[in-house]
Amino acid sequence: MSKLFAIFGDPVSHSRSPLMHNSVFKNLNYPACYTRVHLKDGSKLRETFFNLKLSGANITVPHKEAAYNACDEIRGFAKTVGVVNTIINENGRLIGYNTDADGFIYAISEFRDIKSILVIGAGGTAKALTSRFKQENIYVSVLNRSESRLKEFKTVVDATYIWDTFKVQKYDLVVNTTSAGLSDDNYPCPKDILENILDNTSYVADAIYGKLTPFLQLAADKNITYKDGSDMLLGQGVLANELFVDGELKKDDIRKYMKKSFEL
Ligand code: NDP
């Protein structure tokens, strides 16, 4: 019987996940299909999942914390961060995982000697990435627009700032995890602060993929090596697909056909 998978988000029309997962299923003759679900109210996630008779799902902005609460059991790294981006239906029980952080570690593996990172943003993605960076013994600072979401970071990272309290240091890598630039032309923080940050880093990465955000454009103007979120997307997608097919497909084949979908 064919399985159905979906991505939940708001917005969700920009998501490449259907293309990526369907490319794997189609090319490897795996009996499954992957679709988009525009979900406004995160508290309806569980009910919608079961109504659609899904075998599994990915969750994107802004429902990753709601997804954690929707699950019956949380496994692996998602337990550490309280943020879920992949759900598997295991005999009627929802099992939550987080593949974003390892996807990002894969994405930055080409950047050498990363010992200090500034993360801009304090949402679900920032939470996952900062905890994972700390596991690698990296010095981590977080800069966010507002104070409230920074509270949870204070015991995890080395320094937290809002725009008014920010003090620049030297960074090996600066990562934008805000949604500024996703569907607008905003910088993730005021331009004068961002200029100062970019003048003090070796590499830049954006979690947003498929477009040159104003943040990446400024890095490009300053000749800083940068990358968008495509490799992160690929990395998390490969790990999610492995969970979806539960060992029935080879990881190298999954990566090959998922990568192929990026050429479309
Ligand atoms: P959340 O909604 O959990 O967090 C959003 C963060 O962005 C908050 O810290 C918020 O600040 C900040 N923010 C939003 N708008 C602005 C703005 N105009 N200026 C400054 N800060 C702003 O989102 P997620 O963490 O789930 O996702 C963040 C981004 O990462 C999205 O663009 C998403 O598409 C991308 N992403 C990409 C992945 C990939 O595979 N490439 C994987 C996961 C996410 P405040 O606290 O003040 O509200």
Image (cartoon, rainbow, N blue to C red):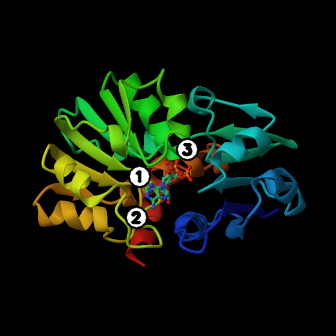
Looking at the rendered image, the quarter that the C terminus falls into is bottom left
**Vertical placement of residue 100 versus 114, above or below:** below
Element carrying mark 3 = helix
- Residue 124 image label: 3
Q: Residue 126 location, x and y as percent?
A: 46, 42
Query: Do tag 3 and tag 2 residues touch (Cβ < 8 Å)?
Result: no
- The residue to which callout 2 is attached is 209
Q: Amino acid at mark 3?
A: Gly
Q: CA distance from mark 3 to mark 2?
A: 17 Å
Element carrying mark 1 = helix
> Which mark's residue is nearer the viewer, 3 or 2?
3
Ligand 1 within 8 A of label 3's CB? yes
Q: Is residue 87 left or right of residue 232?
A: right
> Which mark's residue is nearer the viewer, 3 or 1?
3
**Vertical placement of residue 18 versus 124, above or below:** below
For label 3, count other residues whose C-alpha is less than 10 Å away and answer few (under 14), some (14-19) or many (20+).
many
Nearest to the observer: residue 253 or residue 95: 95
Please, which residue is most extreme toward the left here? 223
Disc nearer the start of the sequence (3/1): 3
User: Which residue is found at the position 60% from the left and 33% from the top?
Assistant: 78
Query: Do tag 1 and tag 2 residues touch (Cβ < 8 Å)?
Result: yes
Disc nearer the start of the sequence (3/2): 3
Looking at the rendered image, the quarter that the N terminus falls into is bottom right
For label 2, count other residues whose C-alpha is less than 10 Å away and answer few (under 14), some (14-19) or many (20+).
some
- Residue 101 image label: none
User: Which residue is found at the position 49% from the left and 35% from the top?
Assistant: 150
Q: Amino acid at mark 2?
A: Tyr
User: Which residue is found at the position 46% from the left and 64% from the top?
Assistant: 257
- The residue to which callout 1 is attached is 232
Ligand 1 within 8 A of label 2's CB? yes
Q: Residue 73 location, x and y as percent?
A: 76, 32
Ligand 1 within 8 A of label 1's CB? yes
